[in-house]
Structures are given as structure tokens and as C-alpha cells.
Amino acid sequence: MRAIIVDDEAKSRNTLIASLKNYTPQIEVIADAASVVEALKKIKELQPDILFLDVQLPDGSGFDILELLPNLSFKIIFISAFDKYAIEAFKFSAIDYLLKPIEPELLIKAVEKLSKESKLESLEGKINVLLSNRTKVEKIALPSAHGLELVKVEDIIYCQADSNYTIFHLVDNKKILVSRSLKEYDEILSSQGFFRIHQSYLIKLSYVKKYVKGEGGSVILENGKELDVSRRRKEGFIQAIQ
């Protein structure tokens, strides 16, 4: 795969070029750029297969590059210094990212994962979610058997564990089966008003209609569904709804 690296720090670019050469020989770096303007020019001229894209650039951001390109015919791995908000945006969009300094084993894993993705059509959906979440998290990209489902976070009533899968229950009674664990979505959604009441359930607190007392008790949601609250999560849940 032919790659372009976009990063305003020369040292970071050179380190990544060396790492790709040493650990991922299937990647050929054909160019690098230090700004939005330079990156746009080289991407249009060279048509890379993969873009390693820094979030912060001197004349804008990696997000600006994606907005200014009419057709996304390449795969993307974002590069970022630790930025809590940017990382959250990547997780909600299901786009791969690497934190600086980049660890070789994570670089290898990210490239291998990207190499296995044969279709580019889901990228546009992921980018749409990423860009819509730039100022406020509104959507989440859910990879399902039918493709990529773009779902408003406010439309999720609760998530249910199903072995290593997660079932999303939405306000329109629609269900989406996703091949990722509930633990992963607990980590992603906990900052958006969700609470893990049980090993099997992650609920949106704003949809809680009633709490029924008991050893752990149970919750009744706006859609009429009653779900158990585990004994060890009871105290934290009661504090969360008060």
C-alpha cells in the first residue's frame, strides 16, 4: 500500500517513516506533508492507498483535510498526541488512531487491520460520524452484519451483552447486533449518560422511568422494558440517577 504521512513535526514524520520501513514492509511511503495545504496537493496528485493523518496541523486540522476532499479513495489512520476529546471522537466513529509516541506493536496491528478491510464504502459513513462529532458527540458508528449503521446516541435506550456481541435497543424498537463486546461500549458511552447496571446491561439514564427496590432491584425503562440491577452496581446506579 502506498502511503502519505501528514504531520507538522519533522521528527514525528521521520520516526513513523522509519517504523513503517522496519515493521510494515507492505507500506511504501510515497510522500509526507506538514500542513493542510501541502497535504491536499500531494493527496490529489499521488492518490495514496492509505493516509497517516495528524489531528493538529499549523493551518487547520486533519478533519479539515477530510472535509475538503470530494472523494475519499484511501484508508485512514489518525495520529494524535493524547487528546481526550479527539480520542472519544475516533471511538464513536470506529476510525483507527495511534497515540504519539507510536508503539511498533500497535502500528503493526493497525496496519494489519486496515489491510484486511476490502471495502472503502464504510469509510464515508465513519467520516460523517467523525465530522458530526467535532463539537458535540451526536452519532456512533456501529459495524453490523449489514454494513455500518450510523446511529444517534440519543436514540439508544440500552445495550445488551450477547456473548462477545452487543445488541443495541433503539427508540423505534429497532435492534442492531454488533460484533463487539459490551465492555467496549461501556468505555465509549459512559461519558454520554450511560450506566452499566448489570454485567449484561448498559442503559441510557435519561430513559429510566422507575427503579424497583430489591436486593439489586430493577429498572423500568421508557419503552416498558424491565432490567435487573446487579447488587454490586446498585449503589453506584442510585447515585447516578439522583
Image (spheres, rainbow, N blue to C red):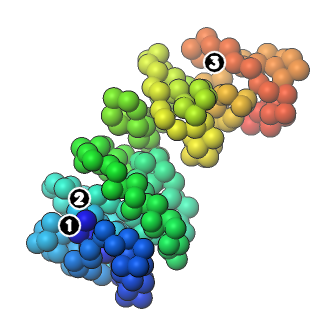
Residue at the location (23% across, 69% down)? 2
User: Which amino acid, by three-letter code, is at mark 3?
Assistant: Leu
Quarter occupied by residue 40:
bottom left
User: Tags 1 and 3 in contact by the CB under 8 Å rule?
Assistant: no
Quarter occupied by residue 37:
bottom left
Q: Please identify the residue farthest to the top as the structure is shown.
A: 224
**Label 1: element kind:** loop
Q: Please identify the residue farthest to the bottom as the structure is shown.
A: 11
- The disc at residue 48 is 1
- The disc at residue 74 is 2
Residue pointed to by mark 3: 221
User: Tags 2 and 3 in contact by the CB under 8 Å rule?
Assistant: no
Q: Position of residue 94 (x, y in %)?
A: 43, 48
Residue 119 horizontal side relative to residue 153, left or right: left
User: Which amino acid, by three-letter code, is at mark 1?
Assistant: Pro
User: Which amino acid, by three-letter code, is at mark 2?
Assistant: Phe
Look at discs 1 and 3 and give the one toward the viewer: 1
Q: Residues within 10 Å of mark 2 (few under 14, many from 20)?
A: some
Q: Position of residue 91 (x, y in %)?
A: 48, 51
User: Tags 1 and 2 in contact by the CB under 8 Å rule?
Assistant: yes
Q: Quadrant of the N terminus?
A: bottom left
Q: Position of residue 242 (x, y in %)?
A: 77, 33
Label located before the other in sequence (2 or 3): 2
Residue 158 horizontal side relative to residue 34, left or right: right
> Where 47 falls versus 144 (above or below)?
below
Q: Position of residue 56 (x, y in %)?
A: 40, 73
**Label 2: element kind:** loop
